[in-house]
Each structure stands twice: as C-alpha cells, then as structure tokens.
Amino acid sequence: MARFLRPLLRGTTYTRLLHLWVPMLIVSVWLYIDMSTPYVPALMLIPVGLIPAVRMGEGVQARLLLAPGEQDSGISIAPAATWRDRGRTVLWLETRMALSVLTWFSTVWGPILTVTLVGLAMGEVPDDVPVLSSAQPHWGYALLAPLPLIATYAAVVGLGQLATLLAQKLLGPSRAEQLAALEERTEQLLERTRIARELHDSIGHALTVAVVQAGAARAAGDPEFTERALGAIEETGRAALEDLERVLGVLREAERPVSSRPTLVDADRLLESARASGAKVDAEVTGPLETVPGAVSREGYRILQEALTNVLRHAGSVPVRVRIGVADGTLDLEVRNPLTAAIPGPGRGSGLRGIRERAALLGGSAHTGPDEGDWQVHAVLPLG
C-alpha cells in the first residue's frame, strides 16, 4: 500500500498533471467559441508543429514539468533542424492533446462519480449523471464510492509516466544531435588526455632534473658545482610551476591562449637543463624552427622534453645527441644516447606511449627503442 501511495508524495506527479492539463485550456477556449467543431484545435497543431522553435519550447516544458531535476532527461531543447524533427514535433503535439483529453475526463468524472455514489448511498437520486441516472438509492453504493477516485489516481500517474516516455521518444535528440553530443564528449576526453600528458611531461621532467641534480651535487662535494646545481633546480622548478599554472588554468576554463605553451623555439632551456643535470648534450638544429606550425612545434617540444627526461631518469649523465631538422615539409626530431641495461624495453612506460601518441595525433610517426647500440627516440611530424 505504501508503494502504491508513494506517487502522491512526489512533486513530479503534480507537475506532470499540470503539463497534461495545459492543452485543455486551448480546447476549452475553442469549445467556448464553436462547440460543434471540437477537432479544429487538433488540426491547428499541424502547422504549429512545423515551426522549428516549437520543438524547443515543447522540450523546455517537458524537461521542466515531466522530468524536473533530472540531469539526463533524454529530451532535447534544440529547435527542429530537419523535416523528421518537425514531423516528430507534430506527432508529439497531437499525442499530448489526446493524453490531455484522457486526463481531463478522468480527473473531472472520477470525483463526480464518487460524489454521485455517496449521494445514492444517502438516498439521493442523480439526474445529471448519464450512467447512474436510473439507479435506485442503496447503502451498498458507499462501498463503490472510492473506486472512481482510485481509477482517477491510477490514470493520472499512468498518463504522466506515459507522457514522459513519449516525450523522450518524440522530443528526444535526433541522430545529428546525438552525434554532436558524442563529438563534444570525445573532445572533452581528448582534452583530459592532453592535460594528463602535459602534466606527465612537464612536471615529470622537472622532478627528474631536480632529483638528478640534487644527487649529483651531493656526490660531488664541490661548493661551486652545488651552487650551479641549486640554480638549475630553481630554474627548473619555476618552469614547472609555470606549466602547472597553465594546466590548472585550462582546468578552470581560464581564457588562456594555446600559444602560451612552449614550442621548439624554447628548446634551449630544455637542453641547458639537461646539461646542468650532467648530461653531455650535443645539439644540432637545421632549418627555420620559427616557421613550424604552432601545434607541431608544441608537440615537438613535449616529445623532446620526454626524450631528455627518459635519458636522465634511466641513463644518467651520458652523452646525448639531439638533432632537430625542418625540411621538405616535415619536422625530424631525433634523440640518441648510449644504451644501458637500465633503459626499459620498447613500448614500456607511459612516457614512450605519450611520444607515439603525440606523433600519431599529428599524422606523423615515432620510433622508440634500441638502434645500433644506442637508445633512440626518432619522431617525424608533417608540417601541413
């Protein structure tokens, strides 16, 4: 019994009832004008439903009254963009009016029948209720009096649920809207993945450099070397804080331009940071780096950063050869260092996966692994 009566305590039951009652206002006004043509309001809904904005208005009403408070109601609030959407809107308007008539009939005649049955039980003979106009008074009608109210209650709850289901079907997102929503969700996931890579590359590089430099300073026991190491750690830490602030700005949806991210033009600070950590970096840059498109240059910077981080983390203070070339419509980036036993095998580690993912997103390719006694990171990125 408690479950049966639970809808009476829900506000949704009454907002749905209000939604079902609204079309009867139009019908009532028309019947006041011409009672002989009750079908005219239904005919008028056909051209009205073909108006694109009507779908949006019906969607707003349905969300507000049929599914209040639901985050994913399955009801669209966009104007009709195709004739299919307009046809579904017309069908929804006609269906809503039909449900409104049933709701009006049940909510009006249910209480009237209950009052009439109570009157018959008390000895009063009805003269305006067609079904019971010939009935004779009897106390037994009192037992039947609650039935019309129960039927009214069931009709109101059932018609409200039916209207919600039909609204989700007829006013639900079209295929184009579903595709747009899927693309938006995909963009959000890609942005989260990009931010995760940014944090891994920038913060991971800074921490690796700081750890290597701190360890080298402690082992050296040279005050002058320690001073230089501390200065390099400070500079690397500041750069990492800048990267962290930028990424946090993206998470806060701050209006910061993408161009604020470092590019290969800023590669000198990566090379100097690696040298300060003890690596013997031999760098060669050919071609105009400033002409490389922003997206390619930014991803190239992160690939170089991750490659140098892996050298410091797994190989330590070893000779490193860096080759950056811009020619024939491609950016060619190569980082090589002597192969040591501590370096992971091909395909292991999120950093190596990140390098290959960055190259693939730009339509390029990246190879990471042993090559002629060296560990090699070689990326080729198209410029256009």
Image: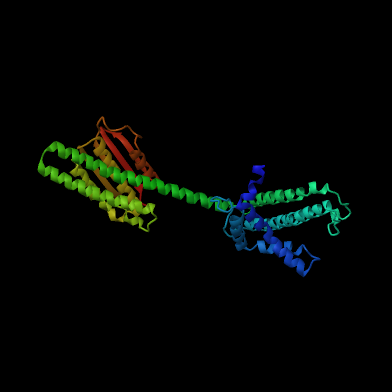
Toward the top, the furthest residue is 341
Q: Quick check: 214 above or below 254?
A: above
Q: Quick check: 337 above or below 59?
A: above
Q: Quick check: 299 above or below 31?
A: above
Looking at the image, residue 40 sits to the left or right of residue 183; the answer is right
Looking at the image, residue 26 sits to the left or right of residue 61; the answer is right
Which quadrant, please, contains the N terminus? Answer: top right
Toward the bottom, the furthest residue is 33
Looking at the image, residue 115 sits to the left or right of residue 373; the answer is right
Q: Quadrant of residue 209?
A: top left
Q: How many marks?
A: 0
Residue 249 can be seen in this image: yes
Tell me which colouring the rendered structure shows. rainbow
The front one of 156 and 280 is 156
Residue 334 can be seen in this image: no
Whole-percent x and y of residue 129? 83, 57
Q: Quadrant of residue 53?
A: bottom right
Looking at the image, residue 348 sits to the left or right of residue 47; the answer is left
Residue for point 19% across, 47% down: 232
The front one of 34 and 76 is 34
Whole-percent x and y of residue 128? 84, 59
Whole-percent x and y of residue 176? 56, 53
Whole-percent x and y of residue 327? 30, 50
The front one of 19 and 46 is 19
